[in-house]
Amino acid sequence: MDYQQIGRQIRGARLRRKMTQAQLAEAADLSVPYISHVERGKKRVSLDALLRISQALDVTVDQLLSGTQPQDKAAYLPEIGELFRDCTLRERRILRDVAAAAKESLRENT
């Protein structure tokens, strides 16, 4: 896991929310030095702290971890399966067609 990238993601989310490190630290019930170290990748953020930071920044943990994992062909497959789980057969077919069209469009534009 790339802790420097996680720190950059946290810093970016904090700045987009126009928060100081002190404000984030207070909202997440963490110390300012801890936030500083995490943002600079000098300290590994714990799962508990990552959760509190994500809640304070009103973003998902996934958003903070985005780009920190090696590329994996199976990425997002569980989430896609979950999205389809309660769909009717008709809804699944429509979603499959929409996904196929989006994929084709993405590949045409890259």
Image (spheres, helix red, strand yellow):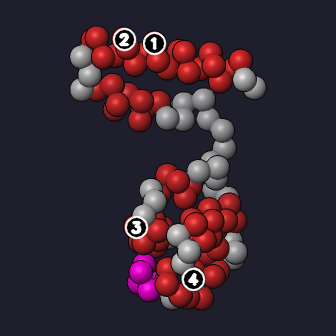
Mark with earlier residue (2, 4)? 4
* Labelled disc at residue 93: 2
**Three-letter amino acid code of the residue under disc 2:** Arg
Q: CA distance from mark 1 to mark 2?
A: 6 Å
Q: CA distance from mark 4 to mark 1?
A: 44 Å
When asked about the image quadrant of residue 26, the answer is bottom left
User: Which residue is drawn at the image coordinates 34% and 16% (left, top)?
Assistant: 92
Q: Quadrant of residue 3?
A: bottom right
The residue tagged with tag 3: helix, strand or loop? helix
Residue 95 in view, yes or no: yes
Quarter of the image where the C terminus is located: top right
> Magenta: predominant secondary structure element?
helix
Q: Residues within 10 Å of mark 2 (few under 14, many from 20)?
A: few
Residue sticking out furthest to the right: 110
Q: Amino acid at mark 4?
A: Gln
Q: What residue type is disc 3 on?
A: Gln
In the picture of the structure, the residue carrying the numbered disc 1 is 97
Answer whether labels 4 and 1 touch (C-beta < 8 Å). Answer: no
Circle 4 — which element? Answer: helix
In the image, residue 40 above or below residue 100: below
Q: Which residue is mark 4?
A: 21
Q: Which residues are magenta?
A: 25-30
